[in-house]
Amino acid sequence: MARCHQDQGYLVAINHAEENSFLTETFGSIFGEIYIGAQQDENEKSWWLNEDPWQFESWDRSIIKEPNNSWEKCVVMAMSGWRDVGCRRAFPFICEKPLNVD
Ligand SMILES: [Ca+2]
Ligand SMILES: [Ca+2]
């Protein structure tokens, strides 16, 4: 998302369970569904926009087994897990920035 790039950041990549619970507990209850930095192809294969390896995932299995739609190629985080959604839907989003080690 362009807004993240303006600040030398990128849409957040969630790399492990601790990061996932932190973000869910901090932002999920306030904002509901929030864009994270994952994209998918038509086979539901997922990757992180910042090119981190895909080594953790936490899909929403509560009602519909997500990811559930090959046309939905963006991903939001929600309290019950991640969901693939259409990329034109408007949601809040979380930017992540590398630490500056100057
Ligand atoms: Ca999908
Ligand atoms: Ca979905």
Image: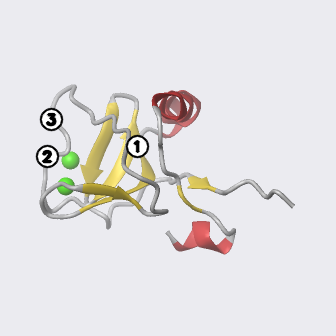
- Secondary structure beneath disc 3? loop
Tell me the amino acid under the disc marked 3.
Lys
Mark 2 or mark 1, which is nearer to you?
A: 2
Tell me the amino acid under the disc marked 1.
Glu
- Residue in the picture at 14% in, 34% down: 64
How much space separates mark 2 and mark 3, taking CA atoms?
6 Å
Taking depth in this image into account, of 8 and 28 the one nearest to the observer is 8
- Residue in the picture at 28% in, 44% down: 83
- Residue in the picture at 15% in, 35% down: 65
Please name the residue that numbered disc 1 is placed on: 33
Please name the residue that numbered disc 2 is placed on: 68
Tell me the amino acid under the disc marked 2.
Asn
Residue 96, compared with residue 8, is above or below; it is above
Circles 2 and 3 in contact, beta carbons < 8 Å: yes
- Secondary structure beneath disc 2? loop
Residue count near mark 2 (Cα–Cα under 10 Å), binned few <14, some 14–19, many ≥20: few
- Residue in the picture at 54% in, 27% down: 25
The numbered dot on residue 65 is 3
Residue 30 location (% of width, % of height): 54, 34
Q: Is mark 2 within 8 Å of ligand 2?
A: yes
94 relative position to 58: left or right: right
Residue 18, compared with residue 77, is above or below; it is above
